[in-house]
Amino acid sequence: IVIPAYNEEKRIVHTLKRYTEYFDKELKKQYEIFIVINGCKDNTERVVKNFAKKHKVVKYKDVGKVHAKGAALIKGFKIVEGDYIGFVDADGSTPPNAFYDLLKQIGSYDGIIPSRWIKGSIVTPKQPLMRRIASRAFNILVRVLFFLPYRDTQTGAKLFKKKALKTILPELGFSAWGFDIDLLYLLKRSGYKIKEIPTHFYKRK
């Protein structure tokens, strides 16, 4: 699980505690969390280093200042190995049980993404009306321009099988807002099948 971190000293330890406690139980340490530290100006690296000393499943690297979250993720994807490679935001908006649902349900698919906009999803707190309208308008635009069938391309958590992700990695760009779209578009264009499932999402400040 790759986690990009830019100035996350106040949130990253809480997220790491929740994820390690949950996945130690479910996967018996057969997993790795890799923190991509992105030119932080606070003590993110120090708090991650201290946490990693006590939890061997947590690795990290400071990749220096990069242009956007997508660029940090690409650097992380190039480093990590594993049958499944995914990512999640450092703020903990996607709880560990919701991320584990991705692993349990990926099945024969090449990738799987959580959606806040399909039946069965739980979003807390409920987003304001204008935010929902803007999100749906953006999604319609993505569908029209890129023929992507997904209801939600922007949730900050996704999981892929190693072969699929590593295959498209050389072509993957890192625009500030288009990273997830580029990622899903390249996978679709390469013939990989991506599943979309409902999720639990807790909006953090």
Image (cartoon, rainbow, N blue to C red):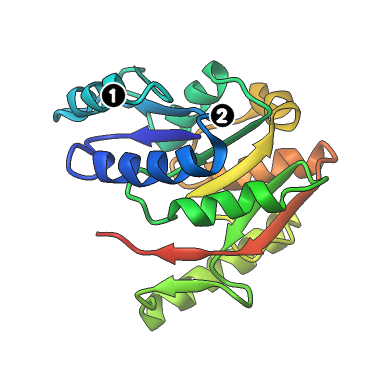
Q: 67 or 51, which lies in front?
A: 51
**Residue 181 vertical placement versus 164 (above, below):** below
Gap in angstroms between the C-alphas marked 2 and 1: 16 Å
Mark 2: few/some/many CA within 10 Å (<14, 14-19, 20+):
few
SS class, disc 2: loop
Q: Badge 1 is on which residue?
A: 54
Residue at 38% of width from left, 56% of height from top? Answer: 93
Three-letter residue code for mark 2: Gln
Q: Badge 2 is on which residue?
A: 30
- The quarter of the picture where residue 64 lies is top left
Place of residue 6 in the rendered image (x, y in percent of width and height, measured from the top left)? 28, 34
**Residue 155 vertical placement versus 181 (above, below):** below
Residue at 26% of width from left, 45% of height from top? Answer: 14
Report whether 154 appears left or right of 128: right
Classify the position of the C terminus by image quarter. bottom left
Report whether 8 appears left or right of 42: right
Mark 2 / mark 1, whichever is N-terminal? 2
Place of residue 51 in the rendered image (x, y in percent of width and height, measured from the top left)? 26, 28
